[in-house]
Amino acid sequence: MSCFLCLLTRWTSSALSLLLLSVVGRQMGLEVVQAKVCSRWGAPDNKSLFQDGDVIIGGLFNVYYIPSPVEQVFTKMPHYQPCTGLDLEPLKYIYAMAFAVEEINGNSTLLPGVKLGYRILDSCSRYPWALQGALSLVGGNTHSCGLSASMPRTKLVPLLIGAASSTTGIFLSRILGPLSVPVISYLASCPCLSDRTKFPNFFRTIPSDIFQARVMAQMAIRFHWTWMGAVIANNDYGQLALQVFQEEIQGKGVCLEFIETVHRETIVSDARRAALTIQASTARVILIFCWYTDTRAVFLELAKRNVTDRQFLASEAWSTSDDLLQDLTISKVASGVLGVAIRSSTIPGFENYLRSLHPSHRPDDEFLRELWQKEFGGTESLEGVQHPFTDTSQLRVAYNVYLAVYAAAHALHSLLSCPNRDSPPGNKSFTCSSPKHIKPIELLQHLNKVNVTTPQGERFYFQGADIPAKYDLVNWQSSPEGSLKLVLIGRVDGFDLHLNESAIQWSTGSNQVPVSVCSESCPPGTRKANRKGEPLCCFDCIPCAEGEISNKTGSLHCERCPSEFWSNVEQTACIPRQLDFLSFHETLGITLTTAAVSGVTVTAAVFVVFLYYRKTPMVRANNSELSFLLLVSLKLCFLCSLVFIGRPSVWTCRFQQAAFGISFVLCVSCLLVKTIVVLAVFRSARPGAETLMKWFGPGQQRGSVFLFTCIQVIICAVWLSLSPPVPQRDLGFQGSKVTLECAMASVVGFSLVLGYIGLLACTCLLLAFLARKLPDNFNEAKLITFSMLIFCAVWVAFVPAYVSSPGKYVVAVEIFAILASSYGLLLCIFAPKCFIILLRPEKNSKKHLMAR
């Protein structure tokens, strides 16, 4: 901007510098003698609108269309073609200002006794002409500079309503800043103009673009559009708006797949590139921060490629453009546009005011005369005629102009009413002025304090340069004629967004919100896992591990359940873990129970067989009393396994280990005594050993079995009295079920029980191994040796299996060891004997048994 002003100063040194000098001098009350006649270069025509008054406010509007841009070479004075073609919408802004002035003059409470006037010029969107017009208004008129002679030369303009663009607002504020002349813009929305240190004399009645960018970000978040594209103008407007939008969506799960910039100078190629990017993109929602002419170029390129399935978000720069709405070529592409628009309000009486306008009533109004010649041929009346000029259904920028006039009027009212006139001089907040001696700096001070209610009942005040953000939310919907119509679907007040979603017609033609995501939101029970090298919005959904949950959509992490709980099947909630134990009703429990009952049945059958054939040599030769006791102990071993099945309780935990330890000691004791008897019999057959059997008679055998068993009983009694097993929940095993088991409070006691059984078993195995080759058919040592090998192998394997088994399978392993060792003893010792007794009765004779 500083370079632009330097060039501008060089180009205008012959005219504008003198005019600027004249302005400064007149603002300071000095008379400046011009040594050179002021003349304009490339000046616009001198059409203007003027109404005299006690206080004159200036107006600067772009009433005419700007011709095609001309490239300047910077080596000679710039050349500009004159503007032609009256623009009806800015013309409506002019009369909104004129209407507001007349309305204020008719108000007895606002500026009483003071007539407000105006001077309105056209700048034709030319920056030099806007500067010339502004300086002419602020510094007063000189006939040599070509303004209408009907304008009084002596009256200054203390305030300017203008700046139809942010760029114009920037340089007008900087040029007029040293003079403290307030500039109230109705259309400059650049966030940069909110900086009071750089632009202390700038005000506006349109919200900053920061707010509309925030609104568009809120809509993207509200409709869960996490994958979007953006097309922006390559200027401060587009860049700042995009920056604010990105700041608002940061951390909200919204990503931009692409950002395309378009330049006014290369719009054809840029629009083609942007259209190709949109066509190839997977994003279904596109944000556009551009001027309406640039947007139209992009839409035309999309229409060529028949891209009609995109949802567009519109900035206020094009969201209400009639040129786009009425263009049938782009209607299919632009259908469903959702946009942010300047707040529309009504101005009571304004429509009647426009319809009452006629050149015959305003002979000095050059703008109105040209309108009549262009539209009506000079004879028509606007009464009862439907015409865009008299359409007041969508007053947006015109209402901003209306507000600007009222803001200026209230500041003047505050300045001229002098509420602190009677206060001591040191307590006066502001100095008092008269309409003929208004200083811009005083008016600027009062403008900063404006806080009033508009005729429409809205609270109006400035926050620095800005007013509270208010927008309309609009939707482009198809009409029967094929064009698009603008439908109001909501409003924005500050940060509150009020939206009627049911009234929206989306790009799909339905009321269903379009989906635009790179990856669908992860449902509960899963977590997000970002894809390497891709944006954060692109991710995979990983199911939570067992025992972990995520109970909301889009979770970044899975949470582990407390120890007493476990995840449900869907991994969405923690539920109490079910108690688990070896039950009689499950397959494993039924299998083990069947095996135990079968063992009891087989043992009982063997017992019956031995009892029936108790007088035969086979039964009598193998110590029938110990054999029957062994069968009883085996039956107890099978039965004790049933105690381990079912829900553990205090008494079952104590009884199961005692029953197991005592029954097995009884069983092994019988085998040990039988082995000792075998050895004693053969030793007594040697010379001099006849008395050996006296020490191993029936009484001694029963006593030995009783003694061995009593030792185990004592061990169990001490263990169970001091530190017995108790029912306990095992939380160590992670699963949906918590095991209810008999916890070994004392590993020493259980080890002693097992150790004692192992000691007897190993002793029996050793003795049986020594007696295995004794010469007799009734020698049981071989059978005892084999059975003890199986017994020891089972219980040696039991220890690591018991330690490593999880949950209820610990109990199953112990039951399996009991049954396996019991079946081993039963089959190895009694199966051969039953085979001879039942199937080979001829061998069940004393002769056969004594053959060796």
Image (cartoon, helix red, strand yellow):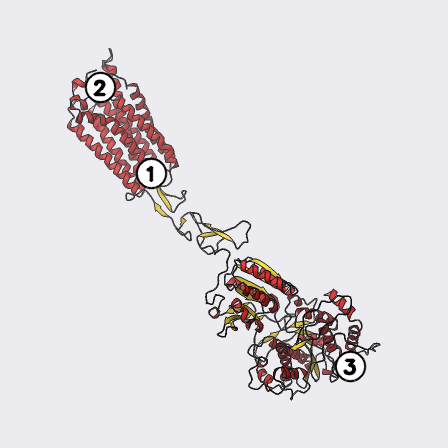
Badge 2 crowding class, 10 Å Cα cut-off, few under 14, some 14 to 19, many 20 or more, is few
**Mark 3 or mark 1, which is nearer the start of the sequence?**
3
Q: Amino acid at mark 3?
A: His
Which of pointers 1 and 3 indicates the residue nearer the eye? 3
Q: Which mark is residue 777?
A: 2
Of residues 8 and 782, the one nearer the viewer is 8
| Quarter of image, res 683 | top left
Horizontal side of 548 relative to 333 (left or right) equals: left
* Residue 417 at least partly seen: yes
* Residue 243 at least partly seen: no
Cα distance between the residues tagged 2 and 1: 41 Å
- Residue 487, horizontal then vertical, whole percent: 51, 73
**Mark 1 or mark 2, which is nearer the start of the sequence?**
2
Q: Which mark is residue 811?
A: 1
- Residue 163, horizontal then vertical, whole percent: 67, 73
Q: Check disc 1 and report its element: helix, strand or loop.
A: helix
Of residues 480 and 409, the one nearer the viewer is 480
| Residue beneath disc 3 | 143
- Residue 377, horizontal then vertical, whole percent: 62, 85
The residue positioned 67% from the left and 79% from the top of the image is 414
For the C terminus, which image quadrant? top left
Which of pointers 3 and 2 indicates the residue nearer the eye? 3
**Residue at the far right in the pictured view:** 35
